[in-house]
Image: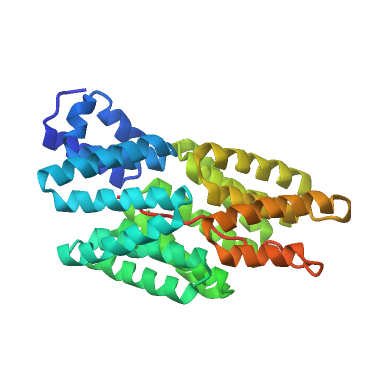
Amino acid sequence: MEALTPLQLLKRAQGLADAGQHVSVLECLRGVEDVDVEQTPPLALLRGMAHARLGDTNDAERWAWAALQAARAKGDDPTALRARNVLAAIALETGRTHHAERSFEDGLGDAKRQGDHATLGRMANNLGIIADMRGDYGRAIGSYTMALAAYQQGGLTVGVAESLHNLAATYREMGDLTKALRTEDQAISAAEASGDRRLITLTRGGRAEIRLMAGDSLVAHREIELAIQEERAIGDVVGEAEDLRVLGCTLAAMDLAEEAERVLRDVIQRAEKLGRPLLAARAERDLAWVMDTPEREGEARAMARDARHRFQQLGLTNEVRKLDEFLSQDRRSNPFIRSELPFVAPLG
């Protein structure tokens, strides 16, 4: 590779990140000494974001902290604010929900004062994710609406797609599948306009989940299989794990319980390896439903208790309540009507 000036290197790495090519970001920075990256806050942050997108939480957190410290030392307030958002997003993904919420709320005010539309959108979007996780759908919609306004004002198509995707998931959880599908289609259009392959795959996976909830399991199965194939092609291990959970639910809806169980157990293992307790809890919850037959009632209840414990640790009382209903005597209902979609926590 030809020698690049620091500015050229930053532009190249940023362009790759904007296109969702996170493996290429790390390859672009591979020949740069760590100390040089550490002393260049935007480069350190891009490296941290790439690691986060690829499921390497430890290196993601290390480089985000390096970016934050270097940015503060250089008086680079915009980069410091973005690094704080990345660190809070990592906290959210790894189960430290209350810490993440405080960080996003503090960052929201700073983003407004700095006039940073991109980071304002990310902070608001992430607060919407937390609200949705807790079943506070009105607050979630308000936060996503704020995020969309900030992204649109800043001309940030990727952010628009991410928040539309999350908004669609909230509508789905509220039971408004018509509005959910319409919003997810808008998210897909925005993702395609951005050229971000990871985001295109994520939004198409979101549409598959809505199709599943609407009772069209065959179409949902085709769409989620295509999404998983694309995630494997681009190396999106986190997205693949999340969509495998959706695949497991789809297989169960098609009365392929044995295959569904195999897939969901694989998701639990992947989630634990990736440090994603929320994904593990969701997969355990779904697996409890799959195993809920007269012959395996004890196993199903044990799995439900494991999921309940994880949700309780995460402070997600809405999920705890639903599992309490499952564990009660009168618990027969469609397990996939309230199956939550993996959310996107914008990192940069």
| 160 or 325, nearer to the observer | 325
Quadrant containing the N terminus in the rendered view: top left
**How far across and how far down the image is residue 102, in percent?**
35, 61
**268 sits left or right of 108 in the view:** right
**How far across and how far down the image is residue 93, in percent?**
45, 50
| 6 or 156, nearer to the observer | 6
Q: Which of the 4 image quadrants contains residue 286?
A: bottom right
Tell me what residue is drawn at x 36 percent, y 39 percent.
60
**How far across and how far down the image is residue 224, in percent?**
58, 50
Residue at the far right: name it: 295
Tell me what residue is drawn at x 46 percent, y 40 percent.
236
Tell me what residue is drawn at x 32 percent, y 49 percent.
86
Tell me what residue is drawn at x 17 percent, y 53 percent.
78
**How far across and how far down the image is residue 248, in percent?**
66, 49
**82 sits left or right of 281 in the view:** left
**Height in image: 306 above or below 110?**
above
